[in-house]
Image (cartoon, rainbow, N blue to C red):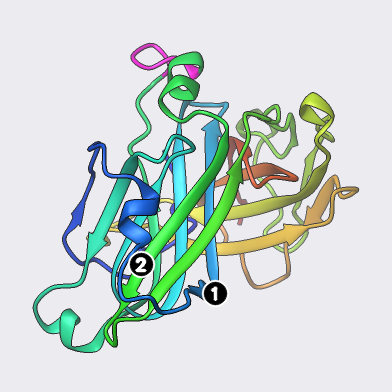
C-alpha cells in the first residue's frame, strides 16, 4: 500500500513530452528579465518495502500559464498548460508524482538512465507573459530504507494511548548526509471511503530514531500502516512501511 503524502495542487491537462526542444530556445522570447520561481524541485522516491521507485516534481510560481522541465541535455521532459477556466486564473503550486513500476519491470539502474544526474531547468510563463525560471540538481544518492523496529504486526495489540514507533538510523548514501526522517501513520481504507485517512505526518531531525504518537491520534481496535522515509541532502527519499493493530 502506498501512503498518499502529498496532494496534487493542480490538475490542468498534463502532458509528458520527450521532444528535442531545448531549454534555451523555450526560454527565449519577449526580452523580459526572467523571474525566479518560488520553488522548483525534482527528486527520487524509492519504496524499499514494495521494491519500486519513481520521481516527484514540485513547482511554485504565481499565476503561471505554462510550466516545463528540461533535463541536463536541454530536452523537455514535462509540460503543463493551464486551460479552460484555469487559464483565466493561472496556476500557483503544482505537485507531480510519476508512476512507480516495480524493480522487476524497471530496475533502479534503468530508472537512473531515464533520469540522469545533473541540473534540471524549470521554465514557465505567467498569464501576464512574464518568464519564470528555476533549477534543481538531481543526484543518484539514494538512502537505504529505514529498518523499522517497532511496532510490528507480530508484536500484538498496541496501547492506543502509549504507542511509540521506532526505527534504526540510516547511513549517509555516497557521503550525502541524511537531513531528516518523515514519519506517517495512516488508518487504512474502511467502508465506503475512497482514500486513507492520514492520521499523523511528522518530519523529524536526522538524529531521531523514535516518535511517540500523541494521545488522541489512535483509535482502539484499529489496524494502522506506518512508514518512515529517510531523506538525504538533495531531497531523494526512501521509505519502509509496516502495520500494527491497537488494542481495546
At 34% across and 45% down in the image, what residue appears? 22
Marks 2/1: CA–CA distance: 12 Å
Q: Position of residue 182 (x, y in %)?
A: 68, 52
- Of residue 235 and residue 71, the one placed in the foreground of this image is 71
Placement of the N terminus among the 4 image quadrants: top left
The overriding secondary structure of the stretch rendered in magenta is loop
Q: Position of residue 202 (x, y in %)?
A: 68, 62
Position of 87 relative to 208 (above/below): below
Q: Is residue 92 magenta?
A: no
Placement of the C terminus among the 4 image quadrants: bottom right
Tell which residue pokes out farthest to the front in this image. 31
Q: Position of residue 17 (x, y in %)?
A: 23, 42
Mark 2 element type: strand
Tell which residue pokes out farthest to the top in this image. 104
At 62% across and 68% down in the image, what residue appears? 217
Q: Is residue 34 left or right of residue 153?
A: left
Q: Is residue 38 left or right of residue 113?
A: right
Decide: few, some or many residues near mark 2? Use Cα within 10 Å; few <14, some 14-19, many ≥20: many
At 47% across and 59% down in the image, what residue appears? 58
Tell which residue pokes out farthest to the right in this image. 207
Q: Is residue 106 magenta?
A: yes
Q: Earlier in the sequence, mark 2 or mark 1?
A: 1
- Of residue 9 and residue 77, the one placed in the foreground of this image is 77
Is residue 3 at all visible to an observer of this figure? no
Q: Which residues are magenta?
A: 103-108
Decide: few, some or many residues near mark 1? Use Cα within 10 Å; few <14, some 14-19, many ≥20: some
- Report the disc number at residue 38: 1
Tag 2 residue: 124
Closer to viewer: mark 2 or mark 1: 2
- Of residue 190 and residue 85, the one placed in the foreground of this image is 85
Whether residues under marks 2 and 1 lie with C-beta atoms below 8 angstroms apart, the answer is no
Amino acid at each position: 500500500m502506498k501512503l498518499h503524502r502529498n496532494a496534487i495542487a493542480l490538475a490542468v491537462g498534463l502532458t509528458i513530452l520527450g521532444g528535442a526542444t531545448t531549454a534555451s530556445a523555450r526560454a527565449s522570447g519577449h526580452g523580459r528579465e526572467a523571474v525566479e520561481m518560488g520553488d522548483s524541485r525534482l527528486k527520487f522516491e524509492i519504496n524499499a518495502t514494495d521494491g519500486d521507485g519513481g520521481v516527484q516534481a514540485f513547482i511554485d510560481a504565481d499565476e503561471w500559464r505554462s510550466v516545463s522541465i528540461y533535463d541536463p541535455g536541454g530536452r523537455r521532459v514535462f509540460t503543463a498548460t493551464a486551460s479552460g477556466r484555469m487559464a483565466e486564473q493561472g496556476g500557483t503550486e503544482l505537485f507531480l508524482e510519476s508512476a512507480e513500476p516495480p524493480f522487476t519491470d524497471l530496475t533502479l539502474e534503468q530508472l537512473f538512465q531515464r533520469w540522469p544526474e545533473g541540473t534540471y531547468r524549470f521554465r514557465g510563463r505567467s498569464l501576464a507573459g512574464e518568464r519564470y525560471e528555476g533549477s534543481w540538481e538531481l543526484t543518484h544518492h539514494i538512502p537505504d530504507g529505514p529498518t523499522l523496529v517497532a511496532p510490528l504486526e507480530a508484536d500484538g495489540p498496541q496501547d492506543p494511548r502509549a504507542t511509540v514507533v521506532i526505527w534504526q538510523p540510516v547511513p549517509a548514501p555516497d557521503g550525502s548526509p541524511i537531513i531528516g526522517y518523515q514519519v506517517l501513520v495512516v488508518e487504512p481504507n474502511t467502508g465506503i471511503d475512497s482514500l486513507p485517512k492520514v492520521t499523523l505526518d511528522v518530519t523529524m531531525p536526522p538524529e531521531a530514531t523514535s516518535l511517540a504518537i500523541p494521545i488522541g491520534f489512535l483509535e482502539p481496535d484499529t489496524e494502522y500502516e506506518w512508514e518512515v522515509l529517510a531523506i538525504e541532502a538533495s531531497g531523494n527519499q526512501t521509505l519502509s512501511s509496516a502495520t500494527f493493530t491497537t488494542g481495546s
